[in-house]
């Protein structure tokens, strides 16, 4: 079992792997935020169009 822990520690201590992990996590946050923004903007525009039709 200690071989697994040693292998994991060597991966965590590798700066390239760490940098790639944080880059992937950052991209995930950016893409998720963009999707949330576009969904909210579409919902807002749809509501505005429906309100303009009724009014």
Image (tube, rainbow, N blue to C red):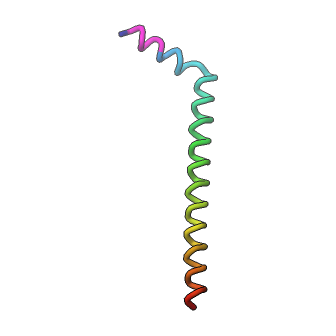
Q: Which residues are magenta?
A: 2-7
Residue name at image x 53 percent, y 18 percent = 11
- Residue at image position (59%, 23%) is 17
Q: What residue is shown at x 57% (from left), y 91% (from top)? A: 55
Q: Nearer the viewer, residue 31 or 53?
A: 53
Q: Residue furthest bottom?
A: 55
7 or 44: which is nearer to us?
44
Which residue appears at 59% of the width and 34% of the height?
A: 22
Where is residue 8 drawn, in percent x and y?
Answer: 47, 17
47 part of magenta stretch: no
Instruction: Assign the N terminus to one quadrant of the image.
Output: top left
Residue 2: name its quadrant.
Answer: top left
Residue 7, compared with residue 21, is above or below; it is above
Count of numbered marks: 0
Residue 36 percent location from the top left of the image: 55, 57
Give how far across and how far down residue 10 sits, in percent: 52, 14
Q: Is residue 17 above or below residue 41?
A: above
User: Does 4 sit left or right of 28 as displayed?
Assistant: left
Residue 24 location (% of width, % of height): 59, 36
Magenta span: helix, strand or loop, mainly?
A: helix
């Amino acid at each position: 079992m200690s071989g697994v822990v040693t292998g994991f520690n060597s991966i965590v201590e590798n700066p390239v792997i760490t940098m790639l992990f944080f880059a992937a996590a950052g991209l995930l946050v950016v893409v998720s935020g963009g999707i949330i923004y576009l969904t909210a903007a579409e919902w807002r525009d749809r509501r505005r169009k429906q309100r303009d039709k009724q009014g």
